[in-house]
Every structure is written in structure tokens, then in C-alpha cells.
Amino acid sequence: MGKCVLIIHGGAVNTDPATIPAEKEEQLKRGLLAALRAGYEILERGGHALDAVESAVKSMEDNRLFNAGRGGMFNINGEVETEASIMDGATLRGGAVSGLKLVRNPISLARTVMDKCKHTFLTAEGAQEFALSQGLALQDPNYFKTDQQRQEWMEILQEAEVEHDNKHDTVGAVALDMHGNLATATSTGGIEGKLRGRVGDSCIFGGGAYANNEVCAVSCTGDGEIIMLANVAHEVYALRKYKKMTITKAAQAAVEMYADKLAGDRGIIAVDPEGNIAIESNTNVFRCAYLVDGKEPFVAVWKEELQEHFK
């Protein structure tokens, strides 16, 4: 039996440190740790990497502090539209969904699409109809709307030049189980004030997520438009597979890939078949956590915490 690894993220962003006071930082770390434990306990008892990443992401979708599921950002019309994807490194099968307004856990719908649908990607009403047919939990739209999100939406409508202390984005997880399987899961509510129907990178295989047992599992976060166009997750895969880079070097290179043409926030978590990990970003905030072989978990909100940890 091999080692078990779980890495999760709750979004990467460049922001004024004043927007994340100590109390909010502590709440974020508690949420990350809860998600990490939810996924890792599956790995610890011999479970599959797919189940672990789904469980970890589901925990963050249920936590209004994170921009996924319940904490999803409002679009310009004051609605929450979510998306997600999941991919199995063993089979190269995956499931993706977007344009959801009623599905409590988008990542579980993505998993159900992968397991029970002849298609790989479903969107909007069709995705929600499939969720209903499969008995997944639906919620009234008000479930997804918090007072803080509503305030930020009002400020966007008023074109207020303000910094938001709730500034955050995608959540994700990558895992290696003791049987050597890799998996990735990514979920988001998108960017605040987005146009209705906008799709980000979280549900795009090769853009925001990718997994292959022979090479690596990757989940991205940041500015979705540039992550899609730079094909960031697949760049990590390609640099590992064809240039034989370490997972850390591959993630570092992918963070900077085409940065002159595609500037913006990028964060990457990745793991390779040997259990080596990478946590890289070009932002001052990267909410993340990881656990390897039952050792002490590491949880961080600030990039400087990561830099200190990996010295």
C-alpha cells in the first residue's frame, strides 16, 4: 500500500491584508481543516481518491465562507450560478456541470454525471433536471444568498470602488490514495458581478482541473478567463509528462505561463503518483491545506505562510 495525500484550496487572490482580519482568517482556517479531515478520513480507511476529493469539496460548498455552493458569488442579476468538475486519474473519466442555480452540491452532481450519464458535461436547466432525476438535494435560490454577498452585489451595481473582505473564489482538491489512484475536484460560484451564463475554468478539463494516474492531479483557482486560455492544469501535466519536471517546478512554470499576455491571479495545487506535492500561486492570499500519511495537517491563508513552511 502506498502513501495517502490530500491537498485542498479555497481560492487564490491578491488583496489588501486588511480585508482578511484575524477573526476571518481563523474562520477560514477552521473551514479548510474541516474539509481536509472530511476527505482524508476516506483515504485513511482505504477509500478511493475520487471519494476523498468529492467529500472535501462538498464540505467547502456547504460553508458560506467559500465561493462554491452556498457561498457562491452573485452574478450581475443577483443570482448565484455555480459550476464544478471532477476527474478520475485511473480511468480518465470525468463529469462537469455549469449554470446551476438550485443544486446544493455541484461537485456531487458532477460526480453523478461521471458515474451515471452518457455525457461528460451538462449545463443549466438540463443539469438540474438530471440532478432531480438522480435524487440529488436541491435548494431554494435563497439558500445560496448571504447578506455579505448581497451587499457586495449592491456595491457592484453602484460601481463602488471598495475592497471586499469576502473576496474569494474557487475551491478544489487533489488526492492520491493508498492504491495509487489520483483524482481532482473543483467547484466555484464564479466571479462577483459576472454576466448571466458566464462559465469559468473550474468545469473545464485541462483548464482548471486535470488528473491522470501516470502523471499528476491538478486543481486551479484564480481568474478563470486566463486560466482557461493558458490551459493551466494541462500545462502542469504536459511539463511533468514531456519535460520530466518535478511537480513543484511544473506548477511554478504553469503559474507564469503566458503571463505577459494573460495577466491575472493564478493558484495551483497538484500531486504526482509518488505523493510529491505542489502549492503555487502568484497571489498574496492562497487559502489551502494538505495532509500526507496521517502527519500533522498544514493550513494556510497567506502566501508568506506557505513560503515559510516550504523553506
Image (cartoon, rainbow, N blue to C red):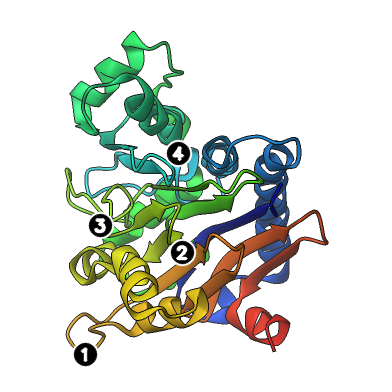
21 or 237: nearer the viewer: 237
Q: Which residue is mark 1?
A: 260
Location of residue 179 in the rendering, given as x and y in whole percent from the top left corner: 62, 43
N-terminal of the two: label 3 or label 1? Answer: 3
Q: Which residue is mark 2?
A: 167
N-terminal of the two: label 1 or label 4? Answer: 4
Disc 3 residue type (three-letter):
Leu
N-terminal of the two: label 1 or label 2? Answer: 2
Is there any visible trace of residue 151 in the rendered image? Answer: yes
Occupied quadrant, residue 81? top left
Q: Which residue is mark 3?
A: 157
240 or 95: nearer the viewer: 240
In 3D space, how far apart are the residues under numbered discs 3 and 2 (Cα atoms)?
16 Å
Location of residue 132 in the rendering, given as x and y in whole percent from the top left corner: 34, 13
Residue at 26 percent of width and 51 percent of height: 204
Q: Which residue is mark 4?
A: 69
N-terminal of the two: label 3 or label 2? Answer: 3
